[in-house]
């Protein structure tokens, strides 16, 4: 570990294999730099206000709201898939009864 005031040597990192990984590497570097600037007292007002906003109650509530919306969307998707499956089961049951009664089986996909 370098002595206080000495610059840290950059750790060599493997090249990113995807754009998402590259973005994550850059974000990590930016956060590390912001942390260093905040520790040294050289952070700009923009950096300081950014991290103050992240710690605010309003931001925490916003994150909770977004998480709740994501959960709601997931539940809606599951409900739609379940409804589709139930419709398919009803159609299969009706066709089985029609077939048993000697009627023509209806295929709704052909219409």
Image (tube, helix red, strand yellow):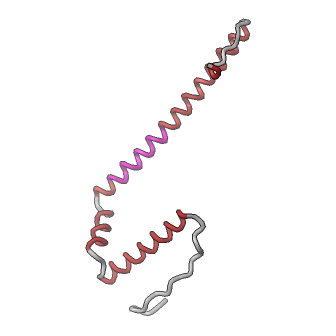
Place residue 91 in its image quadrant. top right
Locate residue 79, reporting x and y percent: 51, 33
Give the vertical position of 18 relative to 88 (above or below): below
Q: Nearer the viewer, residue 22 or 55?
A: 22
Q: Quadrant of residue 103?
A: top right
86 displayed left or right of 26: right
Asked if residue 90 lies left or right of residue 38, the reply is: right
In the image, taking residue 27 as reference, residue 51 lies left or right, namely left
In magenta stretch: residue 33: no
Q: Which residues are magenta?
A: 61-75
Q: Position of residue 96 (x, y in %)?
A: 70, 15
Of residues 1 and 45, the one drawn nearer to the viewer in this rendering = 45
Q: Residue at x 50, y 87 (%)?
A: 9
In front of the other: 63 or 46: 46
Q: Residue at x 28, y 56 (%)?
A: 58
Percent of width and height locating residue 66: 39, 49
- Residue depicted at x 31% and y 67%: 50
């Amino acid at each position: 570990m370098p002595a206080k005031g000495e610059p840290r040597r950059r750790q060599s990192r493997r090249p990113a294999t995807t754009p998402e990984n590259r973005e994550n590497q850059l974000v990590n570097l930016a956060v590390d730099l912001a942390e260093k600037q905040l520790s040294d007292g050289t952070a700009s007002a923009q950096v300081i206000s950014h991290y103050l906003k992240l710690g605010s109650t309003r931001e925490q509530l916003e994150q909770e709201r977004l998480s709740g919306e994501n959960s709601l969307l997931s539940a809606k998707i599951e409900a739609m898939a379940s409804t589709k499956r139930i419709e398919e089961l009803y159609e299969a049951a009706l066709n089985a009864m029609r077939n048993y009664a000697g009627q023509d089986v209806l295929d709704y996909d052909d219409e």
